[in-house]
Amino acid sequence: MVVEGHDRPTRPSAPVTDPTAAPIAVALRGITKTFPGVLANDHVDLEVRRGEIHALLGENGAGKSTLMSVLTGLYQPDQGRILIGDEAGRLRPVTIASPRDAIHLGIGMVHQHFKLVPTQTVAENVILGMDGVPFVLDMATVEAEVAALSERFRMPVPVSAYIWQISVGEQQRVEILKALYRGAEILILDEPTAVLTPQEAAEVAATLRALAAEGKAIIFISHKLDEVMTVADRVTVLRKGRNVATLDVAATDKHQLAELMVGREVATTIDKDDVEPGPVVLRIDGVVARNNRGIVALKDLSLEVRAGEILGVAGVAGNGQRELTEVVTGLRRAEQGTVTVDGDDLTDRAPVRFIDAGVSHVPSDRLGRGLAGNLPLADNMAMKAYRRPPIAAGPMLRRDRMRAFAVDLIERFNVDTPGPDTPARNLSGGNQQKAILAREITAGTRARERGRRPVLIAAYPTRGLDVGAIEDVRSHLLRQRSDGTAVLFISEELDELMMMSDRIAVLHGGEVMGVVTPAETTIEELGLMMAGEMRR
Amino acid sequence: MNLPYRITLEKRLDTPRIVLWLVPVVSILIALAFGAIVLAFAGANPLEAYGQILTGAFGSLTAWLDGQFYAVSETVVRTVPLILTGLAVAVAFRMRFWNIGAEGQLVFGGVFAAWVALFLPGVIPGIPQTPWVYLPLMALAAVAGGAIWALIPAFLKAYLEVDEIITTIMLNFVAILTYQYLFTGPWKDPEGQGFPGSALFPEFTWLPRLTGRVTLGLVLALAAAVVVWLVFDHTKLGYEIALMGENPEAARYAGVNRASIIIVVMVLSGGLAGLAGFTETAGISHRLQQGLAIGNGFTGIIVAWVAKLRPGWIVVVAFLLSALFVGGDQLQISMGLPASIGAFFQGMILLFILGGDVFTRYRVKITRRPAAVAVEV
Ligand SMILES: Nc1ncnc2c1ncn2[C@@H]1O[C@H](COP(=O)(O)OP(=O)(O)OP(=O)(O)O)[C@@H](O)[C@H]1O
Ligand SMILES: [Mg+2]
C-alpha cells in the first residue's frame, strides 16, 4: 500500500465532483487486493459522503466483502489508498492496519457472518474488545447504556440474554448497536437484511435512514434490488473485482442494476412444469417441540409434503421454522407427535437415519452448521456422501474420489472457488451457499438412485445469493420437484413463495395458521396470517 | 509512542513452505541460545554442555568407529513410548478432546500387561508358554487396560457433559496410586527382599531385542504411527474426527454420532497409551516397578503439539525430545548438572516453538505512520 510518510508531500486528489454535495466521509482509491489465485479487488474506487446511504452491489464473489475488509483493517490492500474526510470534506490519507485503527477512525462494520460470542450476553458482546473497558465491570451500567442506545435507534434487544438464546434478527441488531456504541461515523453493513424478515428489514432500513439523517455515512451491501432502490441514495456496482458504475438511485432502475451486476439480462419470471404430485412423502403429525430456551416452539404441528410438490413455509423468522427443520432432520427431539418419511416412522431417530432415508437439508445457518470453515471445500462437499461408495470403500475413504466428486459439483453448480482444496471459509458468502446446495441436491439424487423418495428441506436457500444465482437455485429446486422430490421450502420472501410453491403453509407462534395455494390467496392475506390475525 | 514506524501483525493467507520449515528451526536455535545463558549461570561452559548432550544422545565418532552405538540406542529406547503417547494424544486432540490422561492410561496398560505375564500362566496353564502367544496377549491386555481407563472420561463426557480435562488429569493420580499399591502390596515379589516391585516376568513374555536395549517395541511404535496416519487421512473415522474437531454442530448435521465417536476416539487414544505401558514393561523393566510413570504421558502432549498432531512428525519430534532427555542425563553424569536439565530444555523448546507459531500464521508488517495533518482537497 502506498502510504504517505513524513517526508513525502501528499498528492492532491481529484476534486469533489459536485461542490454542493455533502462532504466526503471516506474515499477508497485504486484498491487492489489479491488472494492466492484470486484477484478479489482490481483498482476499485469508492466515495461515500456524509449523510448518504451508499449501496454496494455485485455478484457473489465480486469482491464486496473484501473491499469492506480492507476499509476496516482486516486485510491490507496490495495497492491503493484510503482517505478519510473531515467535516469540511478535506481528505487525509490513513493507514488502517487493524480493526482497532478502523474503530479509532470511526469506521464500524457489521459482518456478513456475525462475530458475536454465543456464550456471552448481549451487553457483554457490545463492550467486548473495547479499549478502556475497566477491569471490574459494572454490568448494570453497561446494560442500561445499551438499552438506552437500543431505545434511541428503535432496535429492541434483550440486553441480558445470551446470544445463543436470541434470534438472528436480534443478533443483527446487537451487531449494529456494537458499532454505534463504539462511536461509528461510517457504518458498513454487509448484507444486513439477508437474514431478516421483511418487517425486520424495513426496521433496519428505517434505522439506517435515521442514522444517515444524523450525518453518518452508510455503506450497505445487498443483493436485494428492491431494497437498494428504496433505501439507498447512490449505488456502486462491482463485477469480478472491478468498478462497473456508480449511479444515483433516482436515475436508474432494477433492470439496469441487474444487468450491470451480471453483465446479461436476468429473467424475473420462471417456468414451472406441470407436475402431478405423487404420494405423501414427508408427514409431520401433531408435533410438539421446544426451542433452545426451553419454550414450546412447535405446538401440535401437522403438515404433509407430497412427491413432486413444493410446500412453501411462510412466517416471520422465530415462529418455529428452525425447530421445524430440526425436527424433520433428526436434529431436535419431538416431545409429541410423529415424523414419517415415505412410510417409515423416523420420529426422534438419529440424524443419520434421516440422511439414509433421503432427507437433505439446506440449513439456515451456513457457517454454524452447514460447513466446517477450516476444512477444505472437498471435505465439506462430501459431508453427505462420504459414507457410501464411491467415496467410501469399506471403512476407508478414497480421497481422490472425494476430490473428483467436489470438482464435479463445483463445475455443475457454478461454485466460484480456486479449487476443492480451498478452506470453505475463504469462499464468498454466496458461493458457500451454492456449495451447500450442490451437496444437498446431489444427496437427494443419490438417494433416488437407491430407490428412496427424496425430501429436501430448504431453509432460505436463496439468502445471500445474487440475482443470477437465485435464478439458478430456483431452477434447481424446480428440477427437483419435476424429478419427484418432496420439497419443504422455507422463505421470508412472499413473492418468492408465491412463485415457487404449490401450496403455502403459514407459521405463526409454532402453529400452522393455514395451508393455501398461491392461486387462491394474496400477499396481503399471507401477511395477515403471518401476523396471527387470520386462519384458513 | 510517536515513532514514525509501527509494527503490526497481519494474518497470513497462505504460508510459504520455507516459512513452515524455517520458523521451528529458528525457534529451536533461539531456545538453545537461551539455554546457553542459563547453563552459563549454572557455571557450565555452554558449548561443552551442548557437545555433551550431543554425544550423550547420539554417541561420538570414535565410539561409532568402534561399532559402539549404545548412546543412540538409548535414545531410541526412550523414543518408543513417546511415539506411542504422542500418537495417543494426537488422536484425541484432533477431535479437540483434551485427553491429558495418557500417563494414567499408559500405567494401566502396563498393569494389565503385567497381570498377564505374572498370573495368566497360573490361571490358565493350558496356554502355550511361548512369546508367539504371550506377547500378543499382553499387547491386547495393555490396549484394553489403557482403553478402559480412557473410557471413564469418555462416558462422562459423552453422556453427562463432564469436562474431560479435569477427569483425565484426576484419573492419572488414581492410576498411579493403584499401580504403586499393586507392586508394593499384593503383587510384591515375595523373594524380593523388601525391593518394591513385582516378581520378574517369565522370559517368554519379554519383548525380543533388536539391538542394545532396543526391542521390537520400536517396530510396534512405527507401525502404530503408520496406522494413525492411515486413520487420519484415509478412513471415514478420520474424516469424522476432523469434522467433530472443526465444527461439532456440522458433524451432528452430517450424521456423526457424538457419543459413539467420543468413545471410539478414546478407546484408540487410551489403547495407544496402554501400548506404551506394554513396551515399557515387557520390553524394558520386565516387572512392575517404580519407573513406569515417569511422565511419558505428559511429554506425549508436547510431542503431539509440536508435531502439529501429524503422525510422521510425531516420530521425529519424539526422537529429538528423547535425545534431549538422554543427553541431559549425560550432563548430569559428566558435568554434575541437575538431571532436570533435559526437561528444562524441553520446556524451553516447546515454549519457543509454540511462540514461534505466531510467525507461521501472521506476517510482521512494519508500516510508516501517515503524516498527521497531510491534507488533501
Ligand atoms: N481469505 C480469502 N482467501 C482466499 N480467497 C478469498 C478470501 N476471501 C475472499 N476470497 C475470494 O475473493 C473473491 C471475492 O470474495 P468476496 O467475499 O469479497 O465476495 P463478495 O462480493 O462479498 O461475494 P458474496 O456476495 O458472495 O458475499 C472470491 O472469489 C473469494 O473466493
Ligand atoms: Mg460477501
Image (tube, rainbow, N blue to C red):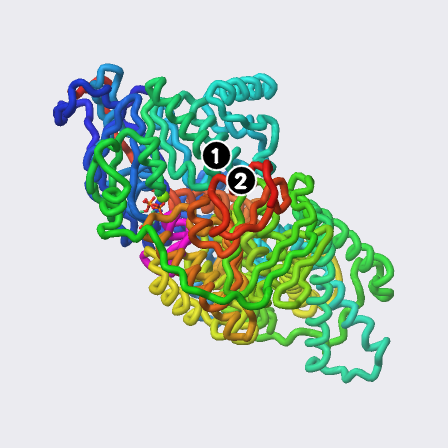
Measured as percent of width and height from the top left, residue A142 is found at 55, 20
Find out if the beta carbon at label 2 lies less than 8 Å from the nearest ligand 1 atom. no
- Dot 2 surroundings within 10 Å: few (below 14), some, or many (20 or more)? many
Callout 1: chain: A
Which residue is depicted at the point 28% across and 51% down? A266
Q: Is residue A298 visible in this depiction of the protein?
A: yes
Q: Is residue B179 above or below residue B370?
A: below
Callout 2: chain: A
Which residue is depicted at the point 58% across and 67% down? A279
Q: Is residue B69 magenta?
A: no
Image-based side of A36 in relation to A483, left or right: left
The secondary element bearing badge 1 is classed as: helix
Q: Is residue B77 visible in this depiction of the protein?
A: no
Front in this rendered view, residue A124 or B46: A124
Residue B195, by quadrant, is: bottom right
**Residue A316, numbered circle:** 2
Measured as percent of width and height from the top left, residue A350 is found at 65, 60
Front in this rendered view, residue B225 or A107: A107
Q: Earlier in the sequence, mark 1 or mark 2?
A: 1
Q: Is residue B89 above or below residue B66?
A: above
Measured as percent of width and height from the top left, residue B39 is found at 49, 41
Q: Are marks 1 and 2 in contact (CB under 8 Å)?
A: yes
Quote the CA–CA distance across marks 1 and 2. Answer: 8 Å
Q: Is residue B120 above or below residue A532?
A: below
**Residue that label 1 marks:** A199
Q: Which residue occupies the extreme top position in the image?
A: A88
Please state the extent of the stretch shown in magenta in the rendering. Answer: A418-434
